[in-house]
Image: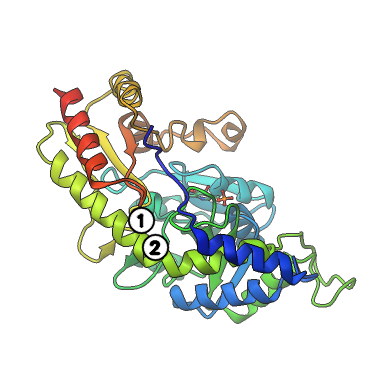
């Protein structure tokens, strides 16, 4: 099976982990061990941010940013439903209400026009998601946020290496949240990072990462244990160095697949409009007009041919049992996309020959 995603781990990561194990320093009481700090510095430089705060998952990064921004019970946060559940989960965890807004049918990212319509007196934040690695349309979102005094927390979990108007994710946001889960463009197994240019927010999030402590056993605020272990940070330092190579290979694979699939009828291919740089975390195609069954049959046939095909996301969050309590939503573009999209393997472990095989198999199945 050609997996939909595969961590790219080599000898250097193993050496880095062993070095940490031998050092005897596995973590730090306030979450800021020497290797974690090195990783934070390198990551902040990579995304051109003033601060980077390493944590143990992307979900923790999102939670830290939401609570750090002061979002609480009674507040509303606008976000897409067509995303991984963590984006909405952290809003609910903070006691606030996720308000779901529909996506653009071509990019699958939150539609700025629809955000403006969803703003109420209770709105405190907007969470755009850079879905599949394609940045959201951040400039109009920034304008809406400024007009209404809202905080933007960008979910860049899938977007390492992407850019928008020449700037990395986070440039138009108050904070950006990253994931280093095993499937991501770079990994630490599990892990996450918040980046921000806001000094006050950064300081607060550093305390909250470690039980609200500035110094041990003297909590200043409510916090959690979101420490990234030193082993993870060591893997992260190596992966970050390799990231440009990974991204180049992802791009090569995506472009090769696009050339193959251009001939297909009724297929919407992923686009990279002017001003956007895709990180190609997922190569997602859309069967125009399909109602779900046709799409699922094609997925099954692809899997039988050994092509790991997945749907991100088959259940938009607003239809999930737990999240229905936040209101009955009709999000036609989201619901249609959830029935028509499928993602194909294009990660750095996929060879050119495999890409050709994937492309030809899709063309044959579509007839
Ligand atoms: C869009 C999105 N948001 C949030 C997350 C949560 O990240 P993690 O799995 O590291 O907690 C992920 C990844 O799984 C994601 O893809």
Q: Is residue 45 above or below residue 334?
A: below
Q: Is 236 left or right of 139, judged from the image as shown?
A: right
Dot 2 falls on a residue whose secondary structure is helix
Residue 96 visible to an observer of this rendering? yes
Q: Nearer the viewer, residue 190 or 68?
A: 190
For mark 2, does the 10 Å Cα neighbourhood hold few (<14), some (14 to 19), or many (20 or more) residues? Answer: many
Could you say where residue 320 lies in the image, as x and y percent from the top left? 54, 31
Q: Nearer the viewer, residue 345 or 137?
A: 345
For the point 29% across and 63% down, which residue is it? 277
Report the residue marked by disc 1.
112
Q: Quarter of the image for the C terminus: give it.
A: top left
For the point 61% across and 50% down, which residue is it? 91
Dot 1 falls on a residue whose secondary structure is helix
Residue placed farthest to the right in the image? 217
Q: Quarter of the image for the N terminus: give it.
A: top left
Q: Is 332 left or right of 32, judged from the image as shown?
A: left
Alpha-carbon span between mark 2 and mark 1: 6 Å
Residue 150 visible to an observer of this rendering? no
Q: Is 315 left or right of 27, judged from the image as shown?
A: left
Are the residues flagged by discs 2 and 1 in contact, CB closer than 8 Å? yes
Q: How many marks?
A: 2
Could you say where residue 158 lies in the image, as x and y percent from the top left? 44, 54
Could you say where residue 342 lies in the image, as x and y percent from the top left? 33, 34
Q: Is 317 left or right of 332, judged from the image as shown?
A: right
Q: Nearer the viewer, residue 47 or 253?
A: 253
Q: Is residue 145 above or below residue 346?
A: below
Question: Considering only order in the chain, which callout, 1 or 2, is on the residue closer to the N terminus?
Answer: 1
Report the residue marked by disc 2.
141
Locate residue 195: give its quadrant: bottom right
């Amino acid at each position: 099976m050609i997996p939909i995603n595969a961590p790219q781990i080599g000898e250097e990561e193993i050496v880095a982990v062993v070095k940490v194990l031998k050092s005897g320093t596995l973590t730090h009481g306030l979450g800021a061990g020497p290797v974690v700090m090195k990783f934070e510095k390198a990551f902040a430089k990579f995304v051109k941010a003033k601060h980077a705060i390493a944590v143990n998952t992307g979900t923790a990064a999102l939670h830290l940013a939401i609570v750090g921004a002061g979002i609480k019970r009674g507040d509303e946060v606008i976000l897409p439903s067509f995303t991984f559940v963590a984006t909405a989960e952290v809003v609910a965890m903070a006691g606030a209400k996720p308000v779901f807004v529909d996506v653009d049918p071509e990019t699958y990212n939150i539609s700025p026009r629809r955000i403006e319509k969803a703003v109420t007196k209770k709105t405190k934040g907007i969470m755009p998601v850079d879905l599949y690695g394609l940045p959201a349309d951040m400039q109009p979102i920034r304008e809406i946020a400024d007009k209404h005094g809202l905080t933007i927390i960008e979910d860049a979990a899938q977007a390492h290496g992407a850019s928008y108007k020449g700037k990395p994710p986070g440039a138009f946001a108050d904070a950006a949240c990253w994931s280093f889960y095993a499937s991501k463009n770079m990994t630490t197994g599990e892990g996450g990072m918040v980046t921000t240019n806001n000094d006050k927010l950064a300081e607060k999030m550093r305390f909250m990462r470690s039980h609200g402590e500035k110094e041990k056993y003297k909590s200043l605020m409510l916090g959690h244990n979101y420490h990234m272990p030193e082993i993870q940070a060591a893997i992260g330092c190596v992966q970050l160095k390799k990231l440009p190579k990974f991204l180049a290979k992802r791009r090569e694979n995506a472009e090769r697949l696009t050339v193959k699939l251009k001939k297909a009828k009724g297929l919407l291919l992923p686009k990279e409009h002017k001003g956007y740089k895709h990180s190609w975390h997922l190569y997602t195609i859309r069967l125009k007009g399909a109602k779900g069954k046709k799409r699922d049959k094609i997925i099954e046939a692809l899997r039988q041919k050994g092509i790991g095909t997945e749907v991100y996301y088959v259940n938009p969050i607003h239809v999930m049992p737990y999240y229905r309590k936040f209101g009955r939503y009709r999000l036609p573009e989201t619901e249609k996309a959830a029935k028509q999209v499928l993602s194909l393997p294009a990660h750095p472990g996929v060879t050119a020959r495999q890409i050709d095989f994937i492309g030809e198999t899709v063309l044959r199945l579509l007839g």
